[in-house]
Amino acid sequence: MLDLGNHALTDGNWLMFALACGWICDLTYVTNFCAESSDGRRPGDLMSVLMQDFDMQADRLQVVATREEFWLSGRTKPEAIDHRDPPVPFTTNVWREYQASEPFDIVCLTRSPEYTPADADPIFDAIVKRFIDEGAFE
């Protein structure tokens, strides 16, 4: 998710940026069944560095400020934390089991050529047509 070799926002690092800016107050991550981890509890593409206390089963995300040496070390947990942002509630759900309890303020639908096969394009187009008002923020 985090690309240290590229200082621009990418499909893989936007979430940490949005969390650090305080733009997300609650996150529900809806996945396809293939994204589940081997334990069946969490998607396999989550990063422990975004999870509260670096715990992959945590129910909150939390951005922490650490020294550059941590990012370059390959360790899974820093020795020192200089700052912790407020934790953000976080849940995951497989799409077939997901049911929202109330309407969302914002839906983020991403189509990444690196990660999404072209044969999924009609699904994205149908979702946009039915659920997303692209002029809502104009």
Image (spheres, helix red, strand yellow):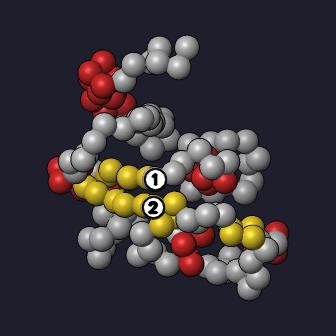
Say which quarter of the image contains residue 33: bottom left
Decide if residue 30 is on the left or right side of residue 98.
right
Comparing 25 with 115, the one in front is 25
Q: Which mark is residue 49?
A: none
Which of disc 2 and disc 1 is earlier in sequence? 1
- Secondary element at image label 2: strand
Q: Which residue is mark 2?
A: 89
In the depicted structure, whether residue 3 falls above or below residue 80: above
Give x and y (percent) for residue 80.
76, 82
Decide: few, some or many residues near mark 2? Use Cα within 10 Å; few <14, some 14-19, many ≥20: some
Mark 1 falls on what kind of element? loop
Image quarter hosting the N terminus: bottom right
- From the viewer's side, name the closer residue of 83 and 5: 83
- Residue shown at the point (43%, 34%) measured from the top left: 106
Type of amino acid under label 1: Asp
Give the percent coordinates (x, y) of residue 20.
Answer: 66, 53
Q: Residue 13's x, y, as percent?
A: 61, 50
Q: Is residue 124 above or below residue 96?
A: above
* Residue at image coords 33%, 50%: 30
Query: Which quadrant holds the C terminus?
Result: top right
The answer to whether one can see residue 136 in this image is yes
- Residue appearing at x 22%, y 50% in the figure: 98
Mark 1, residue position: 26
Q: Residues within 10 Å of mark 1 (few under 14, many from 20)?
A: some
